Image: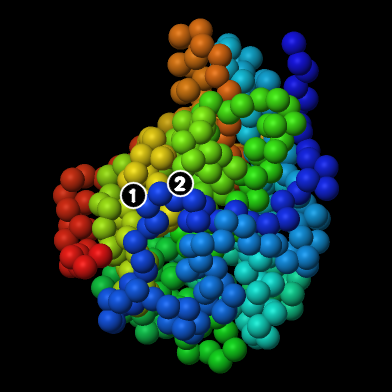
């Protein structure tokens, strides 16, 4: 029997030299982004006031399978990549399963999550364009932390709007962002016209990513030398995160192991899209490929209960419209502890892949059940997972227990997106029995769906 090491690292010479653009291989490309005023497909020129020019080009690129990673970005990646592919021997023993379980751990860098992969690329392109700074939103704080670190590295100013409930739950994330030099404002805020309008409707609003996006966009559009950046959902972000899946596939090839099931948590789609990048090309080409499972919180189930429709990407309805699985741009999820999975919509790329059944399954779980699995994982594997990642762990455990029942040996791979070090208040609440399995009623969903924009027959 071949010995599989506990941790597998690729040699530096085999690190990805190019990002993988899945759109070039998709059988059905996702529907075009629509200009919010004209409802016509957006152009690079339309996006340039929002994003720096190279990122606008990447957003609309549907032809180049591989896009070279700039040498300066590669040099930064080498400070923390490759990330380890870990064989979860202790979890396998705990579950008494014949399954082999592996996880790609992205929490070992200074920012604590996979978000740094796109943050450093976006900051690089902004610096190359000669911008003074950028704005962004952040949910649980992983993206804000990563972008703060990247902007400090390139000498860029950064203004972050952090979803209010997450800012209250994770105050030390705010401290870390400020340590890197960012200005952090809980959202909705009185700083912007959009923020004031949200507060007028609900002075006690817990906030949402859609609201924070609106505020960040307003500031960037009104501040010379600034552009907006986003840590998930967009095509450009999934492109940068493809390094996760490319590394995972190469590491498995080194071990002479084929994945049967690949699992990722899904909020806006950056982690799931990145992890699938190493395998989805085979499925699109009709070759043997893993079974893909997307996992989301029951409190924000865009794939499992959302509508596949055109919708705005922000609550203020100033962004382009995207065809995606959505709960509605005005949707405000309950203030759960998986702040990175609270976005109302799903990546257009992943939405199309799911709609076309290339991603076979989506599941949603309540946060109490997710934390039970997270604690079980921490106690046997010795690593405290971020609440977002724990959704993927729960699905992996379920699949491993199915193998135990059937006696079938399968290889299960999931993404462990980040560390739970900044989520100790959530773990404390779980230990005190304060977490409930929050979900949505049909009435909640229908109220949100009523706010969807009219669907254009042309597209």
Q: Identify the residue at horizontal 38%, vertical 35% (top origin).
A: 361
| Residue annotated with mark 2 | 266
Q: Position of residue 289 (x, y in %)?
A: 52, 32
- Quadrant of residue 17 in the image? bottom right
Dots 1 and 2: beta carbons under 8 Å? yes
Residue 201 placement, left or right of 294? left
Marks 1 and 2, how far apart in space? Answer: 9 Å
User: What mark, if any, has residue 302 been given in the picture?
Assistant: 1
Horizontal arrangement in the rendering, residue 225 relative to residue 438 (left or right): right
Tell me, yes or no, if residue 175 can be seen here.
no
Q: Is residue 420 left or right of residue 39?
A: right
Q: Element under label 1?
A: helix
Pick the residue in front: 347 or 106: 347
Of helix, strand and loop, which one carries label 2? loop
Scheme of colours in the image? rainbow
In terms of depth relative to the viewer, which is nearer, 385 or 344?
344
């Amino acid at each position: 029997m071949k010995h599989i090491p506990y941790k597998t690292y690729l040699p530096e010479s085999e690190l990805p030299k190019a990002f993988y653009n899945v759109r070039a291989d998709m059988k059905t490309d996702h529907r075009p982004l629509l200009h919010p005023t004209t409802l016509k497909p957006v152009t690079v020129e339309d996006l340039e006031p929002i994003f720096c020019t190279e990122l606008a080009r990447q957003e609309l690129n549907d032809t180049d399978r591989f896009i070279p990673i700039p040498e300066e970005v590669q040099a930064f990646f080498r400070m923390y990549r490759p990330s380890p592919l870990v064989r979860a021997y202790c979890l396998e023993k705990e579950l008494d399963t014949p399954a082999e379980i592996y996880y790609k751990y992205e929490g070992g860098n200074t920012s604590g999550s996979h978000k740094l992969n796109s943050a450093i690329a976006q900051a690089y392109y902004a610096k190359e364009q000669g911008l003074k700074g950028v704005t962004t939103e952040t949910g649980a704080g992983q993206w804000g932390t990563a972008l703060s670190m990247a902007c400090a590295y390139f000498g860029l100013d950064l203004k972050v709007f952090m979803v209010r409930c997450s800012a209250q739950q994770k105050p030390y994330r705010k401290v870390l962002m400020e340590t890197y030099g960012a200005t952090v404002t809980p959202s909705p805020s009185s700083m912007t016209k959009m923020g004031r309008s949200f507060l007028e409707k609900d002075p006690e609003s817990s906030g949402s990513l859609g609201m924070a996006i609106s505020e960040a966009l307003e500031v960037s559009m009104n501040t010379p030398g600034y552009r907006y950046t986003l840590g998930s959902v967009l095509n450009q972000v999934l492109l940068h995160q493809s390094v996760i899946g490319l590394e995972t596939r190469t590491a498995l090839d080194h071990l002479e192991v084929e994945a049967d099931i690949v699992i990722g948590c899904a909020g806006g789609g950056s982690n799931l899209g990145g992890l699938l990048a190493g395998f989805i090309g085979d499925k699109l080409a009709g070759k043997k490929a893993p079974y893909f499972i997307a996992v989301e919180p029951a409190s924000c189930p865009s794939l499992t209960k959302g509508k596949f429709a055109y919708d705005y990407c922000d609550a203020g309805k100033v962004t382009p419209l995207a065809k995606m699985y959505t709960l509605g741009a005005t949707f405000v999820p309950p203030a759960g502890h998986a702040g990175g999975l609270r976005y109302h919509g799903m990546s257009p790329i992943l939405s199309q892949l799911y709609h076309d059944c290339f991603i076979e399954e989506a599941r949603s779980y309540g946060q109490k059940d997710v934390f039970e699995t997270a604690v079980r994982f921490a106690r046997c594997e010795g690593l405290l997972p971020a609440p977002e990642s724990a959704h993927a762990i729960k699905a992996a455990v379920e699949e491993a227990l199915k193998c135990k029942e059937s006696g079938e040996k399968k290889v299960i791979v999931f993404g462990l997106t980040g560390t739970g070090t900044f989520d100790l208040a959530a773990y404390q609440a779980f230990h005190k029995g304060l977490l409930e399995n929050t979900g949505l009623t049909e009435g909640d969903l229908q109220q949100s769906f009523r706010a969807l924009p009219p669907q254009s027959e042309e597209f």
